[in-house]
Structure formats: C-alpha cells, structure tokens
Image (tube, rainbow, N blue to C red):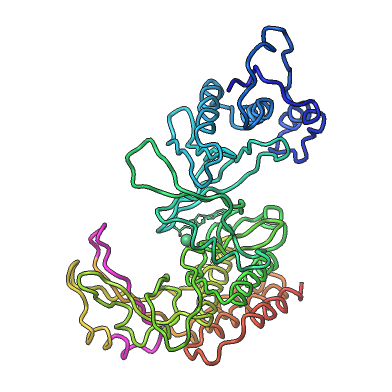
C-alpha cells in the first residue's frame, strides 16, 4: 500500500486533534499541531486502485511525521527507508497479534520492533537482569487517536503470557509494572528465540536514585526521605494487591522496584509470580538469595538440592517471605543507600558497612558437603545464604554470612546519628523508623510477620509525618 495514493475519509481527518503532545521540545509540539496532511487530489492519483483495507495511509503519514520529528535526528537520512520497512512488515502481520519483527541496531539506527499495531524504537538501555533486557523506548501506535509514548520494552527468553494471565486477577495495578502488548520476536539474527513486552516507562530502579545529588529536591521533587517513603508506600500497596489476589512476587529487591519522580513507585519483574501454596507444600524456589527469608528452606542444605546433575532449591515461599524481602530491600536499597549518599556529600567517612562475609567453595566443580553447610549455619547466628556456582564464569559457589538484624539495626542507627547536623530532625526520625521497620520485617520467626495491609499502614504512618 502506498502512503501517497489513498485518501482517508474526510470525517476522520476533521476529527483528528492530537490529544497528547509528545516529546519535550517546542518544535515537536508545533509540528504536531499541524499534521502534515497534504492530500494529493490530482486526477492521476485518484485513478489509482483503492488501498487494501487496514490502517489508512494518512494515519501512516501522520505517524511518519511524528516518527521523523522524534527520532529522526541523527538518523534522519535513513528514517524513510526504516519507515517503509515498518509499513511493509506491518502489512505482513496485519491482524496477527503477539508477533513482532525485531531489528537489531545498526550504526545509523537504534534497534526497533514492529507489531501489527505499533512500532517501538529502542533508544537506550534501561537495565538488565538475569532474564530480561529493558530499553527506554519510544512507541508509535499506528492510529489516529493514539499519540506516541515513552515506554520501556523488555526482551526476554521466556514468554510473558503466564505472568500476564496471573496479573489479570488484579483489579487495579497501581503499584505494579504490568506488561502491555507482548509476544514472540521474529529476528533477522540467529539469536535464540525471544519474547517482548511493552511497559509503562518508570524513571529507574531503587539503585538508580542518586542520594548524593546536592540538588536532590530539584531533581526528585522532594527531599530524600519523604521522596523514598512515598515511593515505598505505593510499592507496598502494589504488594498488597498481589497478596490480596493470592499471588506472591518472590523476587522483591531494589533492582525490581521502580521509582517515578512525581508519580508512583512500582514493583516490576513479575516473572516469578505464582499462586501462594498451602504452608505444607514445597516447590522449586525462585528468588534472589541475598533478599531471601531463611524460613523459605527447611534448612540451609535445601538451598542447593541436586536433581541428577541439575542444581535446584526446594522450599516454600509465601506472603511472609515477600515481606521479609521487602524489609531486606528497605535496609539494603533504601536506608543504607540514603546514608551512604548523604554521608558522601557531607564528607562522613565509613558511614555504614553491612556487607556479608563470604565463605567460598574450594574451586569450581567441588561443592560444599551438606555437613559443611550446616556447620557454617550453626556457627553463625545471622542469616546464611548459598549462591550456586556460575558455569558461565566458572566461579565456585559460596555462602554469605549476614550480620544479625540486631547488629545491622544498631549500626544503622549510629550511622543515622552522624547525619544529625545535615538532615532535618523529621527526616532523621523517619529514616530510623524505616530502619526499624526493616528490622521487624526481617524477623526469622515468620509467625510474627505483620499483614501486608499493616505494612502499607506502617509506611503511611512514616510518610504522614511530612
Ligand atoms: N518499566 C520500567 N521502567 C524503567 N526501567 C525498567 C522498567 N522495567 C525494568 N526496568 C529496568 O530494567 C531492569 C531489568 O528488568 P527486569 O524486569 O527486572 O529483568 P530481569 O527479569 O532480567 O531481572 C530493572 O532492574 C530496571 O533497572
Ligand atoms: Mg529483575
């Protein structure tokens, strides 16, 4: 189909008013308010056979205009050929949902993917975990009434369908980063097959907040402790939504918790989402050991179970272990980072060190015996977690011995005291309350765990002081 020959119904043209002005620059806004529609009504053009059904050409012309404006620089010389290709591919997969063409980046143009409804230009890396690579993207819907959006596209090996199905149970998704359009990728490279999903864009994860930014309030819209408490409240509310739907997240940690300046904090990476099983049931554990509650496993040896030559971990994950991880996240990715960020700008040396001690297997390929693992656990009164050997890097397995939560909390309080001259009293008090909440959540006795609604209330009580 040509984007020059066909004529769109007048009514559709008249009704076109760009609802959302995308992009930042004034020039973008101006160009959007006058959609580049110059319908050629010469007899020669009108004689052409009508375009096949599908997205009418003027829509594509509008989308092309937006696209060229938005990502045309410095890629403008090839913007047209890229767009032609997008159109061709969209014709090929018209009506085929859940499939997209994947184009790897070239020296002239970033990577992009083409679905039957939109195309997504992958502009820069947002983050990478063990399963997925996330890119800050610009998504161009092929539609009159939908404006381009800043999104995040994740590319992963596993399909996003199982988590999407579970997430359908939620009534609202305010504190959860939910996958939108998703499917399989057709790639020109001979990479392993992969999948994509489009998400709303957040500003970053908890490890990307710069607490040593002296203009924090300007950059983040509030001073450090009120800002992060606000974000934690909506993340906990997101967790409550999952728990109320009978689901557990299983991988709560800083890299899976997203912040939004002027918006809500969210939990992302619902890849391990599952229905909570009865307390007596065991299952394969999926988690990040550094954030895991000790009671997930019957004992430390169950963190590494051999099934033939495959290593796995068998235990029971629960709403309680999600909240334990939330507590570990408040300590590691919030309180400790706030303290070290602020200590840096105020030149306070060695503010807080809660790093665990590492006990390493002798070499790659030789595993600790069960007896050795139990011995380390007996000797150590804190939390012990096992990290499997890494076949890619050939690094051996190891055990982390964490400081006790009493120790961690006491050290955190004295590090907060050292900030007394530099932070308003209310923020100091709130930081201690967050540290205290982290301590309570990391109780090794799971029968003492608070409800998820109480976790939200506890955070709200801290936030209400501001
Ligand atoms: N919606 C989003 N907005 C901004 N950054 C994101 C978004 N989703 C993920 N990220 C970033 O990408 C990283 C990897 O994504 P994630 O889903 O956690 O992948 P994995 O399953 O591999 O851990 C995250 O740690 C975060 O830094
Ligand atoms: Mg992740």
Q: In the image, is residue 144 above or below residue 196?
A: above
Q: Position of residue 233 (x, y in %)?
A: 67, 71
Residue at the spot 24% in from the left edge and 74% down from the top edge = 307
Q: Give the magenta range.
A: 376-395
- The answer to whether residue 422 is visible is no
Q: In the image, is residue 316 above or below residue 308?
A: below
Is 466 situated left or right of 171 in this image?
right
Magenta-drawn stretch contains 378: yes
Task: Work out whether residue 293 or residue 32 is closer to the camera in this orientation and state it.
Answer: 32
Task: Work out whether residue 293 or residue 229 is closer to the camera in this orientation and state it.
Answer: 293
- The answer to whether residue 82 is visible is yes
Q: In the image, is residue 197 above or below residue 348?
A: above
Q: Quadrant of residue 384?
A: bottom left
Magenta-drawn stretch contains 357: no
Q: Position of residue 191 (x, y in %)?
A: 34, 43
Quadrant that contains the C terminus: bottom right
Is 133 situated left or right of 455 in this image?
left
Q: In the image, is residue 198 above or below residue 15?
A: below
- Dominant SS in magenta: loop
Q: Position of residue 44 (x, y in %)?
A: 67, 7
Q: Position of residue 249 (x, y in %)?
A: 52, 71
Count of marks overlaid on the render: 0
Quadrant that contains the N terminus: top right
């Amino acid at each position: 189909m040509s984007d020059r020959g066909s004529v769109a119904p007048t009514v559709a043209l008249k009704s076109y008013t760009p609802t959302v002005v995308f992009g930042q620059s004034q020039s973008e806004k101006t160009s959007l308010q006058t959609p580049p529609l110059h319908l050629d009504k010469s007899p020669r053009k009108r004689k052409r056979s009508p375009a096949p059904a599908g997205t009418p050409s003027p829509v594509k012309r509008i989308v092309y205009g937006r696209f060229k404006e938005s990502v045309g620089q410095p890629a403008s010389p090839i913007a047209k050929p890229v767009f032609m290709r997008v159109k061709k591919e969209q014709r090929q997969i018209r009506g085929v949902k859940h499939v997209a063409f994947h184009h790897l980046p070239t020296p002239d143009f970033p990577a992009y993917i083409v679905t039957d409804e939109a195309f997504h230009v992958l502009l820069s890396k947002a983050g990478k975990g063990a399963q997925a690579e996330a890119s800050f993207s610009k998504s161009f819907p092929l539609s009159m009434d939908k404006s381009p959006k800043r999104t995040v596209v994740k590319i992963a090996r596993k399909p996003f369908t199982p988590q999407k199905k579970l997430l359908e149970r939620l009534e609202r998704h305010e504190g959860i980063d939910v996958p939108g359009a998703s499917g399989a990728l057709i790639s020109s490279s001979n990479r392993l097959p992969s999948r994509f999903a489009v998400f709303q864009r957040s500003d970053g994860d908890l490890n990307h907040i710069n607490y040593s930014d002296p203009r924090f309030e300007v950059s983040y819209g509030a001073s450090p402790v009120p800002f992060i408490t606000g974000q934690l409240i909506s993340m906990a509310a997101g967790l409550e939504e999952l728990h109320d739907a009978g689901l557990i997240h299983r991988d709560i940690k800083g890299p899976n918790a997203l912040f939004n300046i002027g918006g809500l904090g969210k939990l992302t990476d619902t890849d391990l989402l599952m229905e909570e099983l009865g307390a007596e049931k065991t299952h394969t554990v999926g988690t990040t050991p550094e954030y895991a509650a000790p009671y997930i496993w019957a004992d430390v040896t169950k963190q590494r179970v051999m099934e033939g030559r495959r290593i796995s971990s068998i235990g029971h994950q629960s709403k309680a272990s999600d909240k334990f991880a939330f507590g570990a996240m408040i300590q590691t990715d919030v309180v400790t980072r706030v303290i070290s960020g602020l200590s840096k700008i105020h030149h306070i040396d060695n503010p807080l060190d809660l790093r665990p001690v590492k006990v390493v297997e002798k070499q790659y390929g030789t595993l600790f015996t069960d007896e050795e693992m139990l011995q380390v656990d007996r000797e150590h009164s804190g939390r012990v977690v096992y990290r499997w050997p890494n076949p890619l890097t050939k690094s051996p397995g190891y055990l982390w011995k964490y400081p006790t939560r009493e120790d961690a909390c006491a050290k955190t309080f004295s590090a907060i005291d050292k900030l007394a001259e530099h932070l308003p009293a209310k923020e100091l008090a709130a930081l201690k309350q967050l540290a205290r909440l982290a301590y309570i959540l990391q109780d090794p006795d799971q029968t003492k765990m608070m409800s998820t609604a109480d976790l939200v209330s506890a955070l709200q009580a801290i936030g209400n002081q501001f």
